[in-house]
Amino acid sequence: MAELRRTPLYDLHLSLGARMVPFAGWEMPVQYPTGVLTEHRHTRADAGLFDVSHMGQIILRGENAAAALETLVPADIVGLPPFRQRYGLFTAPDGGILDDLMIANKGDHLLLVVNAGRAEQDLAHLAQLAASHPGIRVDPVEDRALLALQGPGAERAFSWLVPTAPDLRFMDASDLDWDGTSLWVSRSGYTGEDGFEISVQADRAETLARLLLAHDGVAPIGLGARDSLRLEAGLPLYGHDMDETITPAQAGLGWSIPKIRRTGGARAGGFPGADIILPELTAPTRVRRGLRPEGRAPIREGVTLYAQPEGGEPIGRVTSGGFGPSIDAPIAMAILPADLPDGATVHAELRGRRVPVTIVPTPFIKPTYKR
Amino acid sequence: MLRYTEDHEWLRAEGDEIVVGITRHASEQLGDVVFIELPETGREVAAGEEVVVIESVKAASDILAPVAGTITAVNSGLADTPGEVNEDPMAAWFFRVKPADGAWLDGFMDEAAYQAMIAG
């Protein structure tokens, strides 16, 4: 096995008593001594600090970088105003999803943030783009950590160090000064809470993290709670709720493809799989749904779902599932036939029995983004 | 008398019954427990049979019957407060089993042997 990579905050995690686990080629904290439930609830009540330095940060430069990226990503990147960020997907020629990413317009370049487990493929994909588009340059950012500060107390805690932080609204992306160090900050996250994602040079990362943690109300949060927070927020995770076999419409991510890139739009299509992806947007036959199982037993990824309490063929399987600490009940997501209405009951096969499960809208909790 | 299994259960002899729970080491490895499914009292079990389902925030796992016998009681309160397994694992018992003839605690690890195993 290849050696696991460590983030600039590795020593900090150890000193905080984190349990470290392998994750997408990195050695990451899955939880701290307080445990996943406490960390999760703390983030929703006050503020949680996450090390997400394993995620890939990539700079795309060149006069026509936005137009070039639109040939890989069905989003409106040409129309993305300076210092704004958008969510998008790398799509495949057969309509599947290669990765999901954030794209920020930083004025003279684009900053992309991609999943750790897909970063290498994404870079190869972008290198091909650069090869066919003279003047486009792709640079992976290797010398910066990425922190996420999430929760209702995030703004108060961050503005203690960076007084200009409250000026950012949801999905703004700017460079902010912290004591002479430039932070690449966006007001975003993946927890359903207000918060910030903060890129900082590696040699200043631990100082920044320790200062944030010194603030009342900020606690370190591991990958375990990051997963339950995003699940409650109804946010899909690459490799689980979407992958190369799942199209944007099926993943419930059609909203990320704006009118201008859809059939009839000024810049319709022109991305991999457009001929499959665009027609499906208006009437997908299968789509990602929220699930609330009866009782308290979690229904996890891979569990098979049936229409009937007995017999019949499977109609889908759980793509993400677990316990939702803030709603104190099991929750899950699955890709199911689109004609099943919210409120319909399906049945999950759990340890040889079928458990009734209600289809519900997502998110499971009300997000608190500062728009 | 406390004894331990290789599956990180603790076993306590009380009269002619054995009380079964999981060790602190096991509860820490599991993480926060959110769901417990206990067996029916009166159920006849074989040694090694899965009798309890524990779901933590991370994963599902089973507790096995340490010996063949009959389940005589379960700690039904745990179903409502599964977090007790994390807070005080030595007090959060799951079930009592009355061993079938000949089955008893011989052959299970004592404290020292168990500590040596988890340190291993």
Image: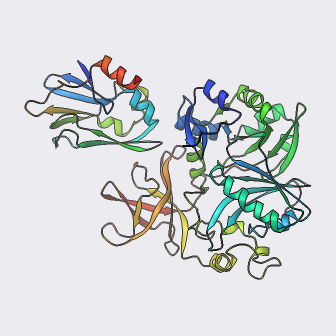
Q: Is residue B84 visible?
A: no
Residue A326 x, y percent position in the rendering: 55, 44
Q: Which color scheme did the rendering employ for the protein?
A: rainbow
Is the residue A315 above or below the residue A215 in the image? Answer: below
Which quadrant of the figure has residue B21? top left
**B102 on left or right of A113:** left
Q: Which quadrant of the figure contains the N terminus of chain A?
A: top right
What's the residue at 68%, 42% (across, down)? A52
Q: How many marks?
A: 0
Is the residue A209 above or below the residue A348 in the image? Answer: above
Residue B85 x, y percent position in the rendering: 39, 31
Towards the viewer: A317 or B17: A317
What's the residue at 66%, 27% (across, down)? A11
Towards the viewer: A348 or A248: A248
Q: Is residue A291 visible?
A: yes
What's the residue at 72%, 69% (across, down)? A257
Which quadrant of the figure has residue A238? bottom right
Residue A153 x, y percent position in the rendering: 71, 37
Towards the viewer: A202 or A173: A202
Residue A368 x, y percent position in the rendering: 69, 49
Which residue sits furthest bottom?
Answer: A264
**A97 on left or right of A331:** right
Which quadrant of the figure has residue A13? top right
